Image (cartoon, grey):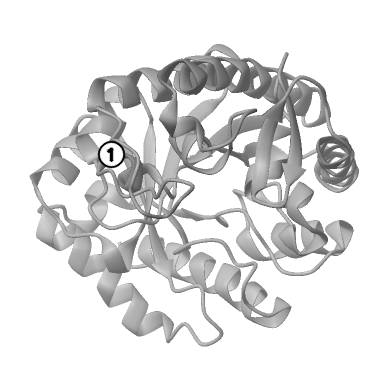
Amino acid sequence: MALATGIGSMPGTDVVDTVHTVLGEVGALPHVPELPARGAPAGMVGRSLALLVGVGADLQPQGWRLTDHDGVDLRRARSLLARDLDAVEELAGEHRGPFKTQVTGPLTLAATVERPKGDKLLADHGARRELAESMAEGVAEHVRGLRRRLPHAELVVQVDEPALVATLEAKVPTASGWATHRKVDAPEADALLRRYVDAIAGAGARPVVHTCAPDVPVALLRGAGFQALAFDLALAHPHDAWAEAFEAGVDLWPGAVPAVEQPGSDAVLGRRLETFFDRLGFARDAYDERLVVTPACGLAGVSPTAARRALALARTLAEASADER
C-alpha cells in the first residue's frame, strides 16, 4: 500500500502541537518534525551538528563553524533535539511500523559549515572526511537512541542533501564570493555518502536520501546504497537511470505536493504522479506497494494551515493511488 510522509521541517515553535499534526495527517509513516522557526540551533544544519562525536561547533555571524569545544549554540541544539525526541516518545512511543527521522548529509554540511580558520569544509578534503566520520558515528548513536524511545518502530533515516548537485558541479561560492569551490569528484562523494549509509544500516535503520535539486545524480545515490530516493517531482526528468534504480530495488519517493500555500488539487497532482511513472514504463501495480508520496520539500516556509493541508494531500494522493488499483 502506498504511504505518505513529510520531508522534515514544519512551521511554528510548538513541538508537541506539531507532532500531533504529523501523527494525525500523514498516517502510517510519521516523521520527527524540525522547527527551524526556533532559530539556527533548531534548523537542518544545527540539528544535525548536534549529533557530532568528538568534534565541536559554534554559530558565528557567517554561520556554523567547527571548533575544539561545544559552543553555546551547539549545546542549545542538543537540548532542543532532546526535547523534541521526548515529545515524540510521549506521543508516539507505541507506534508500530515505519517512523522517519532526518539528518543533513555530508556534502551539504561540507558546503555549509566552516573550518575552524574559516571558509567552507569544501576547501579541505581531509576536513570533509573527518566531519563525515564524526557525523556517521553520531547518526548511528541517534538511531540507537530513537530505537529506545520507539521500540516497536521500523526506523528510517532520511539523509538531506539539498546542496549535493552544487558540490558535484562546482557551484558553491567561496567566502570571497568571487570564485567557487572545486567540485567534489564522484568517487569521493560516494565514499562520504557510504559512511552514512553504512552507519544507518549498521544501526538497523533504512537509509533514504532526499534532494530537491534538479538533475538528481540517481546512479551515484543508488551506488552509495540508499534504499529510496526522495525528490521534487516537478524538477525530475524521467530517464533510464530512474527506471534502472527502481528495477534494482531502490524505491522512489516523489515530492508530488508543492510546498506552497495553495499546492493545487489532488486530481492535477495525481495525474503528474502517474505521468512520471508512465514515462518510466511502470504501470500502477508495479509501484503502489513501494510508493511514498511527500511534499516537494520542507514546509517551514508556509503557514501551519498550509502545512497540514500539504501533509493531508500527500496522504490523499497515496491512498488514491492504492484505491485505484
Up/down of 286 relative to 106, above or below: below
Nearer to the camera, 262 or 109: 109
Label 1: element kind: helix
Nearer to the camera, 50 or 225: 50
Q: Quadrant of the C terminus?
A: bottom left
Quadrant for residue 116, please give it.
top right
Percent coordinates x, y for residue 211 in the rendering? 40, 49
Nearer to the camera, 233 or 64: 64
Up/down of 269 relative to 112, above or below: below
Up/down of 58 relative to 277, above or below: above
Quadrant for residue 69, please give it.
top right
Quadrant for residue 235, please give it.
bottom left
Percent coordinates x, y for residue 283 in the rendering? 17, 56
Q: Is residue 248 left or right of residue 125?
A: left
Q: Which residue is mark 1?
A: 168
Residue displayed at 63% across by 57% down: 27
Query: What is the total number of numbered labels drawn onto the structure image?
Result: 1
